[in-house]
């Protein structure tokens, strides 16, 4: 059954997860380690 929603990429899910974790107060370093980001600079640019 289709819901008529646009496709979601893996990157979209990771970005959403990072945004949610930061919004509820997780530290940037925890978000980096949880999402296996190689650099805080990359994650900081997206947050």
Image (cartoon, rainbow, N blue to C red):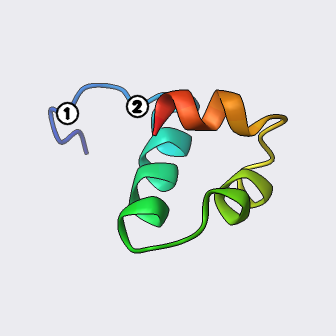
Does 45 sit left or right of 39 as displayed? left
- Tag of residue 5: 1
How far apart in space, not on screen, are marks 1 and 2 (Cα)?
9 Å
Q: Nearer the viewer, residue 14 or 42?
A: 42
Does 37 sit left or right of 25 as displayed? right
Query: Vertical placement of 22 versus 18: above or below?
Result: below
Which residue is denoted by mark 2 in the rendering?
8
| Number of residues whose C-alpha sits closer than 10 Å to that of mark 2, classed few (under 14), some (14–19) or many (20 or more) | few
**Residue at 62%, 37% in the rendered image:** 43
Give the SS element for disc 2.
loop
Position in image of residue 24 (x %, y %): 38, 73
Position in image of residue 32 (x %, y %): 72, 51
Q: Number of labelled discs?
A: 2
| Number of residues whose C-alpha sits closer than 10 Å to that of mark 1, classed few (under 14), some (14–19) or many (20 or more) | few
Quadrant in which residue 30 is drawn: bottom right
* Quadrant location, the C terminus: top left
Query: Vertical placement of 21 versus 14: above or below?
Result: below
* Quadrant location, the N terminus: top left
- Tag of residue 43: none
Position in image of residue 4 (x %, y %): 15, 32
Position in image of residue 3 (x %, y %): 17, 42
Quadrant in which residue 42 is drawn: top right
**Residue at 49%, 54% in the rendered image:** 17
Query: Vertical placement of 40 versus 21: above or below?
Result: above
Q: Nearer the viewer, residue 40 or 8?
A: 40
- Answer yes or no: do the residues labelled 1 and 2 have beta carbons within 8 Å? yes
**Residue at 84%, 35% in the rendered image:** 38
Give the SS element for disc 1.
loop
Q: Nearer the viewer, mark 1 or mark 2?
A: 2
């Amino acid at each position: 059954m289709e819901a008529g929603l646009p496709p979601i990429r893996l990157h979209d899910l990771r970005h959403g997860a990072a945004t949610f974790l930061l919004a509820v107060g997780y530290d940037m370093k925890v978000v980096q380690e949880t999402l296996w980001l190689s650099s805080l600079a990359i994650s900081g640019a997206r947050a």
